[in-house]
Amino acid sequence: YGGLTGKTKIDFGCGDGLYIPFMNIMSNPVIDQSFVESVIIRPGENQNKAQKGDLFFNGSSETPEEVGMCSVLLDDIPSLYLNSFCFGFRFNNDVNASGLYFAYYFRSTAGRQLIFSLAQGATRYNLSKTNFLNLVVLFPDNKEQEAMAGFFYDIDEEIKKLNAKLAKCQKLKIGMMQQLLTGKIRLIDN
């Protein structure tokens, strides 16, 4: 399904609806629920709502390597929509598949090569939804999908914690350098 349609600049930044920005999909295998923005959705508008378990792909990029980056929505967020530069994919009810597994798969080397083979363009690369839907993807059973996806998710969470710790240490270093280099504090008494 497609993202928001018929919107103008004045519809964004206010309203009760929320939408997933392009960069949330580009940057995260799992949609960061703190990185959504507001949009006005008027009564009677026919917009596609995003649902828990949906996969999202950016439909175009300046490089073929960046087209078709994939993210999954793991949370129930009411009145959530997708930006107009991306498309959503929802598994049929009878398909036993892990959206988290596929988000990581389409970001892996094998998944990127598969998407790269579909990229069309010269200066701007696009991913055709029709060609995407014709992909044949082999995948393990659901139990193995869940195990692999959980492993990668846990690693991502650990990386986030380490990056937060690194940022904190960098701020501490900058603060200490400022104090030491301006002479406000000294390490050695004379």
Image (cartoon, grey):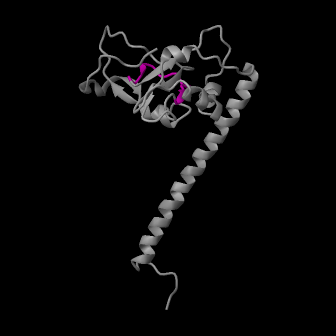
Q: Residue at x 30, y 10 (%)?
A: 43
> 83 above or below 44?
below
Does 107 lie within the magenta span? no
**In the image: residue 7, left or right of residue 91:** left
Q: Does 81 appear in magenta? A: yes
Name the residue furthest front: 122
In front here: 91 or 128? Answer: 128
In x, y percent, where is residue 65?
Answer: 52, 35
| Image quadrant assignment for residue 155 | top right
Can residue 5 be seen here? yes
Q: Going by the image, does 34 lie left or right of 133?
A: left
Camera-side residue of 141 and 133: 133
* Residue range corresponding to the magenta coloring: 69-84
Q: Is the magenta stretch mostly helix, strand or loop?
A: loop
Q: Position of residue 116 (x, y in %)?
A: 55, 29
Camera-side residue of 17 and 46: 46
Where residue 41 appears, x then y in whole percent? Answer: 32, 17
148 relative position to 11: left or right: right
**Camera sees residue 34:** no
Q: Residue at x 32, y 10 (%)?
A: 45
Q: What residue do we see at 64% from left, 16% from top?
A: 136
Quadrant of res 61: top left
Please identify the quarter of the rendering in which residue 60 is found: top left
Q: Position of residue 154 (x, y in %)?
A: 66, 38
Placement of 51 over or under 37, stated as above or below: above
Residue at the farthest left position: 10
Q: In this view, does 163 lie above or below 63?
A: below
Residue at 42 percent across and 14 percent down: it is: 48
